[in-house]
Image: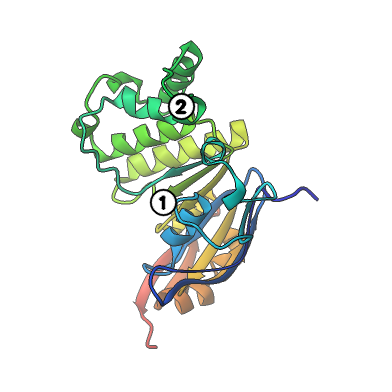
Amino acid sequence: MNQPIIQVKNTTFSYDQAPVLHSISIDIPVGQFIGVIGPNGSGKSTLLKLLGGVLTAGSGNLLFNGTDYLNKNRKQLARSITWVAQDHPMVFPFKVSEIVLMGRHPYLSPFTFEGEEDIDIVRSAMERTQTLQFAHRSFNEISGGEKQRVMIAGAIAQEPEVMILDEPTSALDIKYQIQILNILKELNADKNVTVILAMHDLHLAAKFCDRLILLDHGQVFQDGSPEEVLKKEHIEKVYGVEVHLIRDHDGKIMISPGTLCTQ
């Protein structure tokens, strides 16, 4: 059996005194497309920040290809894992092309500039995400959906083994949601990039993800295929709402909410 690309071993994490994550253990094989789901405050963003190296756990708790995150050179880790946040505040008026070029920074030495190979990689990433047409526009002038595609283009330009995205379709209309998830799914299929993303839309999670990790109060409540995780009793227990499960035309699970559960 191949070694998981990422291992989380009995990890607990606290911002202050109260733990946000409790004894999390997860193995992530190469090439999976994983959705992390759960209600607000369940620990989704914190878990993704740990996986992306944005937050630090204790020694031996997080391994990348068998090596402790803490023992990895930060530039090497940045080449392997890319993190795309939910919000993209930008103080300086960078052009879109400059934002995507930042994805090449882990490959550059101090005081060196991007070469032809870097420019080609960036152009290819922008073509894949359909962002090349506004390469010279200011990042702050484009729409929310376009900004998300630009950030994903920068992540693709990084040529990572793992892409981690915190709610990449949040607050976007359905067109951009499907477009972004299709881009990630194609990258997963074409390049065998492992994709891990937090999601709120359970139907889209069922439609696109190979595996779902359902969190509840900082713990893994269920972990498995969409069919295994999105069961009526699991959703009602974790989300506190009665639901009816139906199927779309592809046979994927859709969830119709009912009334609030009494707890």
Residue 154 position within the rendered picture, expressed as x and y whole percent measured from the top left: 41, 31
Q: Is residue 40 visible?
A: yes
The structure residue drawn at horizontal position 35% and vertical position 32%, both measured from the top left corner, is 150
Decide: marks 1, 2 in contact (CB < 8 A)?
no
- Left or right of 198: which side holds 90? left
The structure residue drawn at horizontal position 25% and vertical position 43%, both measured from the top left corner, is 89
Name the mark nearer the viewer: 1 or 2. Answer: 2
Element under label 1? strand
Q: Which of 181/20 is in front?
A: 20
Element under label 2? helix
Name the residue carrying label 2.
Answer: 104
Q: Is residue 247 visible?
A: no
Neighbor class of circle 2 (other Cα within 10 Å; few <14, some 14-19, many 20+) is many
Residue 15 in which image quadrant: bottom left
Considering only order in the chain, which callout, 2 or 1, is on the residue closer to the N terminus? Answer: 2
Residue 217 position within the rendered picture, expressed as x and y whole percent measured from the top left: 45, 75
On screen, 218 above or below 209?
below
The structure residue drawn at horizontal position 23% and vertical position 36%, both measured from the top left corner, is 143
Neighbor class of circle 1 (other Cα within 10 Å; few <14, some 14-19, many 20+) is many
Q: Please identify the quadrant where the C terminus is shown.
A: bottom left
Q: Which of 181/76 is in front?
A: 76
Q: Which of 218/53 is in front?
A: 53
On screen, 182 above or below 250?
above
Q: Which of 17/238 is in front?
A: 17
The residue furthest right is: 1
Q: Amino acid at mark 2?
A: Arg
Residue 151 position within the rendered picture, expressed as x and y whole percent measured from the top left: 37, 36
Q: Amino acid at mark 1?
A: Asp
Residue 166's disc is: 1
Residue 71 position within the rendered picture, expressed as x and y whole percent measured from the top left: 61, 48
